[in-house]
Amino acid sequence: QRNETSKHMVNEVCRVCRWENPLRSGTILVGLVGFFIVTQHYSFLQILSGILMLAVSINLAYVTIIQFSQKVITDRPTVNPYSRLLNNSSDLLSKDAAAHYSSIMVDVAEVLIKAMSRIVLIEDRKRSVKWLCIFFIIWKISAYVSSRLLILGFIISAFIFPRLYLSNKDIVDARLQQGHAIINAQTHRIQKMACEQFNSVKNKAQTYMAKSKSTAAAAAAT
């Protein structure tokens, strides 16, 4: 079940990044960017207080208008329009919904921990080396760029580059294959040069050892 949950979430994230639903993807992107911009100027306590203040103000005006209308029109005791929610707290947050979302959070945490442990514990050497390079690059860049800007840049890139790739898939794939061929050729050339240098050094060492042995044998005979 947890694998299905993680796969479903990965598929949903991919759909958002590929802009399969432009309205949904645009809303999420604007919301994330807006969140980072707002949190840069205001603390979480200020944001929470502002949201609660706005909610109380709007609902205060709404409830006052509704109750005033009830009193003027029907001339009956006023009733709070939110009385059903206030009397039935399970409508606000059901235990089933809370358990469901808690289970999803645990599944996501488990997937992340497993993925990180595979990298740290070297399950696959190539993958661990790749992530080692990524971590090193992030470590160097973070010395000059704030973490907030790095995360914001990553979020924007996650929404932009997949779409650009899908729009120019043939061109990008051709360039990637060309780059891969160049890298393979350079790697093969470097390996060949390294082997030649190693063989040259090995031959020189063997020649030197042979000369040393012959010199020592001649000295011993003398």
Image (tube, helix red, strand yellow):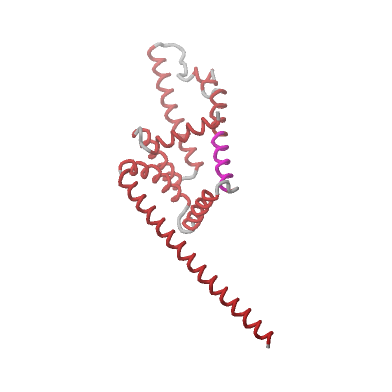
Residue 172, position as x, y percentages in the image: 33, 47
Q: Is residue 19 above or below residue 149?
A: above
Q: How many marks?
A: 0
**Where 197 sits versus 84, above or below?**
below
Check if residue 108 falls in the magenta segment: yes
View extreme (front): residue: 221
Q: Is residue 134 above or below residue 83?
A: below
Q: Say which of 188 and 26 sits in front.
A: 188
Residue 10 is situated, as x and y percent measured from the top left of the image, at 47, 36
Left or right: 188, with 213 as reference point? left
Q: In the rendered view of the protein, which quadrant contains the C terminus?
A: bottom right
Q: Residue at x 47, y 16 (%)?
A: 79
x and y percent of residue 155 in the render? 42, 44
25 or 36, nearer to the observer: 25
Where is 90 relative to 36, above or below?
A: above
* Main secondary-structure element of the magenta-colored stretch: helix
- First to last magenta residue range: 107-119
Q: Who's the residue at 55% across and 28% down the image?
A: 1
- Residue 110, x across and y down, in percent: 57, 37
Q: Residue at x 46, y 15 (%)?
A: 78
Residue 38 part of the magenta segment: no
